[in-house]
Image (cartoon, coloured by chain):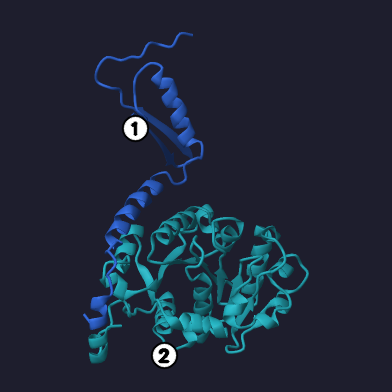
Amino acid sequence: MGILDFLKRKPEPTATVAKERLRIIVAQERSTRGAPDYLPLLRNELLEVIKKYVHVDLEAISINLERDSGHEILELSVALPDGKPVAKPAAG
Amino acid sequence: MTAEIIVVTSGKGGVGKTTTSASLATGLAIAGKKVAVIDFDVGLRNLDLIMGCERRVVYDFVNVVQGEATLKQALIKDKRHENLYVLAASQTRDKDALTQEGVEKVLDGLAAEGFDYIVCDSPAGIEKGAHLAMYFADHAMVVVNPEVSSVRDSDRILGLLASKTRRAERGDGAIKQHLLLTRYNPVRVAAGEMLSVKDVEEILGISVVGVIPESENVLAASNSGTPVILTPDSHAGQAYSDTVARVLGEERPLRFIDVPKKGFLQRVFGG
């Protein structure tokens, strides 16, 4: 290290932070790539309906769109909580 | 007649697409290929400046698409290489002036003229101009800087290349993807301040076709309207020459990706 370098303040090494953030966001964006725009909205509305009967979080619902030669399959899975269900069914 | 169509694209702006288009086209011409390089950035013409032919633009890409000029009239012959031609973007029209059919007609016309390579300099973004620039491509050179937003955008572009191109739609086999890392600073990488070649390759899942070091020669070259590949004593110029050779199938090791060894005086005084 030169004399002048010694006097300059070194910035923090941040490349590893950048790499980790990119790894996560790129993986997330790849998993939803090509999916229709309405998917997040559909997921939220489904959650509202399910919530009328069972307490679940947004994370409990996963929606996948799979393409199989020629047709598409919308796969919905809801992880129900362990204990007893229920919020009261909404009065209609 | 078939011509190989290469799109130079990135998503993010300012990463070096036009610099790369100019040097790639010039490098292919030096290798003896007949090359046309097209500016797809309608409304923001810039390739002509980087190629140093801005005062010779009479007709442009949009004029040809709209039938107001012939391809021969609009192609600007490079002053330095007789088998290199530039097709400038329109500076006055809006981006809707380009249509898929119009672009296809121009590309077919160039192939019929015996061009070996057509380099399409894409505008930034993922809208119509960028879509048209990539749609007919056989190869894509995705330009990326070692910086978070550029890397993320290039992943998005890689996704579009795999789905929104003629090759993808027809199932003609995938576009050949070449990742070009530009503005690379080995000193900052060694200090842990900048993503490394390996980091970017791991995140995006493809290997680089070249690494262009950050260099003051790039600005000097654009100032004078000379593609930087024609500055053979610069590292950036040499790195572009290597990249073009790799695109043509040659194997060359990456250079200028490690910290240069310092001389005695530099070691004492830093710098």
Residue B45 at x, y = what percent?
A: 63, 71
Pick the front one: B92 or B32: B92
**Residue A26: x percent and y percent?**
37, 52
Chain ID, mark 2: B
Q: Identify the residue at image location x=41%, y=67%.
A: B145
Does residue B123 show up? Answer: yes
Q: Chain A is drawn in which colour?
A: blue
Answer yes or no: are tags 1 and 2 on the same subunit.
Answer: no
Q: Which circle marks residue B193 in the picture?
A: none
Does B17 sit left or right of B74 as displayed? Answer: left
Where residue A64 sits, quadrant-wise, is top left
Give whichever of B66, B145 is nearer the camera: B145
Host chain of mark 1? A
> In the picture shown, does residue B254 fall above or below A45?
below
List the residue tagged with mark 1.
A59
Mark pair 1, 2: CA separation: 57 Å
**Residue that mark 2 sits on:** B233
Q: How crowded is mark 1: few (under 14 residues within 10 Å), some or many (20 or more)?
A: few
